[in-house]
Image (cartoon, grey):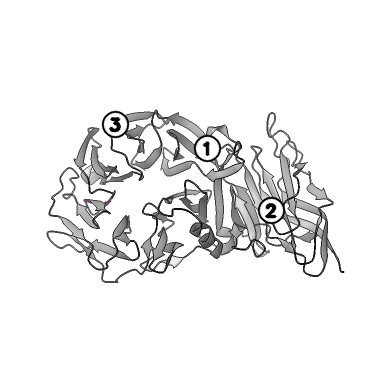
Amino acid sequence: MTAYPAFIGGSYVAKSPIAANARTVNYYCERQDVGGAAPLDVLYPTPGVTLLDTATVSPGRAHFAQAGREFAVIGPTFYEISSTGTLTSRGTVAIDSNPATISSSGDAGGELFITSGDNGYIFTLGTNAFAQVRTGATTMGDFLDGFFLALDAATSTLYISELNDGTTWDPTQFAQRSIAPDPWVSMKVWDRYIWLFGSETSEIWYDAGTAPFPFAPHPSGLVEMGCAAPFSPEIVSGAIMFLARNAEGTGTVMRAAGFTPEEVSTFPIHVALESYDSLSSGIGDTYELDGHSFYLLTFADEITWVYDATNGPMPAAMRWTERGTWIAEDNQFIAWRPLYHVFAFGEHRMLDRSTGALYRLESDVSVDVDDRPLVRVRRPPAIPASDGRLFVSEFEVGLEAGLGLQSGQGSDPQMSLKISPDGGKTWGPERWRSAGAVGKYSTRVFWTRCGSAKRGDAWQPEIVVSDPIPWRLTGATFRPSVQVR
């Protein structure tokens, strides 16, 4: 048996599928450092969700947690969330097609600033009082050095509140874009700097201590990259990440640990993003779990792309994977519905981009929203038949077997194999094998008589699982032979 090359890896679907057609959905990659030996690459299953509560309105639009309190904007309602996940209404907000934002002034101000529907609202933490403080000109908000910030993307204008007082906004305290002609479309505070993203270029502002307006452009200069999706910027593992564009094109994911962004997207990511009808709808999210830091970029009508920003010797080809909610009735993935993560009360919690649900995210849960199965796909790179017809007499997946449940679905977990003789253009029927009932640790998952590919084509397998067990894959082997004609 021969080790299957690059069986453990991420999603890499090139413009031409015969060049590259690898896909990884609802797994993430991890490189094990085993000390002196060759590194071991593993595919681990992504976490599932447990329903905590459901609002009477929808969808989830913003989520925030700090100092032992948790809040969310779901539909037109601003909620506080208890340690048990119970939702309590604290106010009503305007809505539009954008997400909402929530930012805090901490102990000094004791307020939350909520933006939604182009308006701004203040929630006073000490009294639970809720009031509208801005009407219009409030696309999104943030906080820095005692000031709440409001960006009006329609006029490229940055407004600031009074110091430690989000209820007061002097209309003369603003800055408008003048360094470059493209408009500001997004804003994110990171590391005591305000990133003001234009549509093609961006600026980094800081607290210069000037009066009456304290913020000014940093002398480092203009960033020659703008933002394609205003709600894509997120702080991930000590850096800011966003979906970028410039005057020459769009569809690049950038990461900046300082003032200079670096591209982290691959060619196939470009190809995928450029095929979407609207990049501006992309929403960024992030969470850290099991030692990994993930950046999630969700497109409602497409898929959720995930970048693993974890430090360590992981190749770029292993960092990008996909998340999706499987819609069995349509036989397809949609973008993963859990969105807007916070860590609150010792739990990872997320809202739902389609409904009013609140979830707990858990590694040992293998169920998606609405109790749907978490369907997981691994399609490794194809094996080219370059010297003649390639025959594969046996194919085996390496995994942790014997993890079946005591009863019900998953008591005899099944893995499906499909085979393509032409690099993913056409596929044969599904063939199922057991991954071992509980305690059957020596179970081998293999198939014989696995077909062939003619010279000039490529042989490619695809495995799919959906039973609610921890599917941990360590690789694959196959037995090839070539018939020269």
The amino acid type, in three-letter code, at marker 3 is: Arg
The amino acid type, in three-letter code, at marker 1 is: Val
**Residue to which mark 1 is pinned:** 49
Give the Cα distance between marks 2 and 1: 24 Å
Q: Earlier in the sequence, mark 2 or mark 1?
A: 1
Q: Is residue 415 visible?
A: yes
Magenta stretch: helix, strand or loop mostly: strand
User: In the rendering, at what x and y percent does residue 411 appear?
Assistant: 71, 33
Task: Specify the farthest residue to the bottom.
Answer: 220
Residue at the location (71% across, 38% down)?
413
Residue at the location (17% across, 50% down)?
163
* SS at mark 1 in the image: strand
Q: What span is colored magenta in the figure?
A: 142-148
**Residue to which mark 2 is pinned:** 474
- Mark seen at residue 90: 3
The amino acid type, in three-letter code, at marker 2 is: Thr
Q: Earlier in the sequence, mark 2 or mark 3?
A: 3
* SS at mark 3 in the image: strand
User: In the rendering, at what x and y percent does residue 135 appear?
Assistant: 20, 43
From the viewer's side, name the closer residue of 394 and 287: 394
Left or right: 301 in relation to 121: right
Residue 131's quadrant in the figure? top left
Q: Earlier in the sequence, mark 1 or mark 3?
A: 1
Q: Residues within 10 Å of mark 1 (few under 14, many from 20)?
A: many
